[in-house]
Image: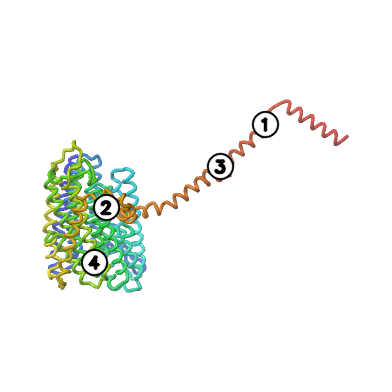
Amino acid sequence: MLWGMYFHTVSLVFLLLSSLVSIGVSLASLNFGLSYVIEWEIFSLSSSSVVVTLVCDWVSTLFLGVVLFISSMVMYYSGDYMDGDKGYNRFMYMVFAFVFSMGALIISPNLISILLGWDGLGLISYVLVIYYQNEKSANAGMLTILSNRIGDVGILLSISLLFMLGGWNFIFYGETLGEDFFLLKIFVCLAAMTKSAQIPFSAWLPAAMAAPTPVSALVHSSTLVTAGVYILIRFSGALEGSSVQTFLLIISCLTMFMAGLGANFEFDLKKIIALSTLSQLGVMMGILALGFPDLAFFHLLTHALFKALLFMCAGSVIHSVKEYQDIRNMGSLVLCMPLTSVCMNLANLALCGMPFLAGFYSKDLILEVVFMSSVDFLGVFLYILSTGLTVCYTFRLVYYSLSCPPNMSSMMMISEGHSKMMGGITVLSVGAVSGGSILAWVVFPESYMICLSFFLKVLALLVSVVGGLLGYIINMVGMSSSLKSMGLYWYIAFMGSMWFMPILSTLSLSNWGLRTGDSFLKVGDKGWSEYFGGEGSFSEFMTCSKYLQLSQENMVMVYMKGVFLWVVVVFLIFA
């Protein structure tokens, strides 16, 4: 009982110290240009050694440090959020196992040993999504794990293809993989797309919001959804100059546009933030496909800081308004929860790329590099439009939840009386403000050379201002209430439901099988197979046994008639 009571404090101290050590090792590796590889050989097969390998370079240790830092805040935050829950200890152990799996994935440069973290993430994410044990959670968990199993198959097939090189240390073979290994690149790309929820595997990411909010803060900031991006960052040398890059760029641009569009029509607070995560994953994948893995890694780190803060603020709001998640049932929270509102606005502005917050340093640099690169007009247009949509749904969220007239129940008492939750939020808000500049100094000691016209230089800021104004003003006007009467219902249904992707990922795949199974059940199991099988055979046997029983009954009349007939027959034959 004592351990359960102080589990969050023990986790905070342990994970925070581990984070500081990891970041210190990263800075030392970056300063001295050193990388350490630790390898254990399990057995050798056909000159290929099956080994467990750990790599400690500045990329893996810096990312691990950020993951451990966010995890420590989330575990401490869970001390209040999950207080009173019967499965408190079970929840904490599962979150700890989830962090361990992500750590195993980060420091593994070997496709064999990476399976430990890769499959661990998939399994534990399923267990956490179904934590509340209701029908909605079960459906979301099945969609999550089945979508991720496709990526697991991609990793397994990659292992078999990499066998030709005599080992599975992909971090060493990256630049030697030519067009002969095109299929290997496709499989790795497929695995990354499923883990990072790119089109057509996007439906599971908003569905995973059925998990408790601390899990969402961890999953959608620095662990599960970023695993695919991290794998592609490690494989970036092999993808250089390949046609897989073009395919990945198209998919990522469509994903960030689709997610930004869907978030502007969503009313579930957690799903809006989940769709913003999906949009930012598209940004990371896009810049990675353009051949800038360092920028993708930089945005991965800064996004983790402010997105974890945003989810934790959302969890505080949901916890205070008695588990409501519909933003239309909120309003004027800035009066009741001033500190949470300040931190939430900080995270929102960092997400929009407001100057000198964490998101600005990575997002603005990515947009400028896109403007300088050889992307066609459609790609640049989707990047600009997605940036505007990001600011649009952010200000829409701010209007509905924080500043519009209150729509809550008159019996609600909203307060910020949870010290552990507010402690985690406050610490992460410091990272959302200063994390971008600190990481920029560490990751980019020498700045990029950006040469753009004045219009392109201010275009990102201009699009953000226009998107923010539209997002705030349109919802003040209340235009969405008359969309059905305007004949736009089906267009809104298409754009607001992620282009019908949840339906296509679930009902369209299972509908034929379920209908066919129902027909077999009616015609086969309950029809002809019953007639010719068990039930029919039983009926026929029973009918025959009745006649047999009648013939064998001990009746004197029957026997006498039989003897008489037998005598008559014999007499007629021999007379």
Q: Mark 3 = which residue?
A: 534
Alpha carbon of mark 3 to alpha carbon of mark 4: how far? Answer: 64 Å
Nearest the viewer among 21 and 309 is 309
Q: Mark 2 = which residue?
A: 265
Q: Secondary structure at mark 1?
A: helix
Mark 4 or mark 1: name the one nearer the start of the chain.
4
Residue 469 placed where, x, y %? 17, 56
Alpha carbon of mark 2 to alpha carbon of mark 1: how far? Answer: 77 Å
Among the 4 quarters of the image, the one containing residue 528: top right
Alpha carbon of mark 4 to alpha carbon of mark 1: how far? Answer: 88 Å
As shown in the figure, which amino acid type bears the numbered disc 3?
Gly
As shown in the figure, which amino acid type bears the numbered disc 2?
Phe
- Would you say the residues marked 2 and 3 are in contact, meaning their CB atoms lie under 8 Å apart? no
Q: Residues within 10 Å of mark 4 (few under 14, many from 20)?
A: many
450 horizontally vs 531: left or right = left
Is residue 144 visible from the viewing direction of this image?
no
Residue 360 placed where, x, y %? 15, 62
Q: Residue furthest front?
A: 486
Quadrant holding the N terminus: top left
Q: Residue at x 17, y 47 (%)?
A: 404
Q: Mark 4 = which residue?
A: 287
Eye-nearest disc, 2 or 3: 2
Residue 547 placed where, x, y %? 66, 34
As shown in the figure, which amino acid type bears the numbered disc 4?
Ile
Alpha carbon of mark 1 to alpha carbon of mark 3: how far? Answer: 24 Å
Height in image: 308 above or below 372? above
